[in-house]
Amino acid sequence: MSDRAYLATRKGLFELHRTAEAWHLGERHFLGDPVSMLLADRRDGTLYAALHLGHFGPKLHRRKAGSAQWTEVAVPAFPVKPAESEDPVDWKVLQIWSLAAGGPDQPGVLWAGTLPGGLFRSGDYGESWQLVEALWQVPERAQWMGGGYDVPGIHSICVDPRDSNAVLVGISCGGVWLTTDGGASWQMRAEGMRASYMPPELAGVQAVQDPHRIVRCAAEPDKLWCQHHNGIWRSTDNGAYWQEVHPQQVSNFGFVTAVHPQDGETAWFVPASTDSQRIPPQAALAVSCTSDGGQSFTAWRGGLPQQHCYDLVYRHGLDVSADGRVLLMGSTTGGVWLSEDGGGQWQTIAAHLPPVYAVSFA
């Protein structure tokens, strides 16, 4: 069972430790600075923290396992935009929105997704980064657009545990893309999704889909789950086709999803009340779970606030431990909850932290 986790917040990075009695907040890092993303690399125990410093730009820091020292490393950067380019997007990294470790056979390989929607690869533990040009240059990028931000961004990076050169990414709003050759070529992978915010004749266009979050089951890699802007979809063929599932008596809007690492039929969601309100339905927080591939859902509420609750859980605000037993969730209102029984009952870890951007088990 996991005994350590991390919380990336608007005002620093917080550690969470489990003792014999309970979970407790521990050390704090980068206090006062917005930490937009973190990666706890389970290959070697290295921790990466991405900072979003506004006028001073994004920063990336690395702490090796067993060390108390943070080292600033390089940040992804676009090449100079050609003078003749008609691309309306400014080729400047605004924020590191996602971080992922390469496969176990690729020590030092990291992936980063940014705002705007660039995918970057590092082969040296973040000391240097290279833009994945093939994805940046796909003709369909002209159709990508901003969702919650003014520009499109890459928020989901799913490395296939069977083949480290196979990587699937989710883009808001740019659909789903897959490479099987380490990024040299890409194919769209959003067939079956629909965008209700588009005119009916364009709702099925793959390049305009807004997959809020995509996760892959580690033990059953062909099984993927997606919390889309206007529904929940799942794929059982590595994204070749997506099928919409319909929660009963639970909103299908939200931002986050997590999948059981050993069981691709089990996934969790945190429903919100429409894209205009963005609060829990009836102002009562719930975690919705399916254990049968989306045929049925249970809304777990035990231990979660059920009155006057306006917490929203961002795309990276829910994580599940490697054994699938422990769930950790953080909200925009600074609430942090943890469940040790797969989501049935929750305990409050904190109620007044800064807004939580991302959570991760070590």
Image (cartoon, helix red, strand yellow):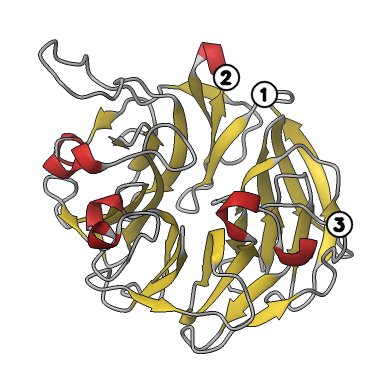
User: Which numbered dot is residue 53?
Assistant: 2
Q: Amino acid at mark 3?
A: His
Identified by mark 1, the residue type is: Asp
Q: CA distance from mark 2 to mark 3?
A: 32 Å
Q: CA distance from mark 1 to mark 2?
A: 7 Å
User: Is residue 108 something one can see in this rendering?
Assistant: no
Residues at badges 1 and 2 in contact (C-beta under 8 Å)? yes
Give the mark toward the camera: 2 or 3: 3
Residue that badge 1 annotates: 33
Q: Residue at x 70, y 45 (%)?
A: 332
Q: Which mark is residue 123?
A: none
User: Residue 218: x percent and y percent?
Assistant: 41, 70
Foreground residue among 263 and 239: 239
Looking at marks 3 and 1 on the same chain, the residue that comes earlier in the sequence is marked by 1
In primary-sequence order, the first of circles 1 and 2 is 1
For residue 240, above or below residue 30: below
Question: For mark 2, does the 10 Å Cα neighbourhood hold few (<14), some (14 to 19), or many (20 or more) residues?
Answer: some
Viewport quadrant of the N terminus: bottom right
Picture quadrant of residue 135: top left
Task: Give the number of marks.
Answer: 3
The amino acid at mark 2 is: Leu
Q: Which mark is residue 308?
A: 3
Residue 60 is at least partly visible in this image: yes
Q: Position of residue 179 (x, y in %)?
A: 19, 54
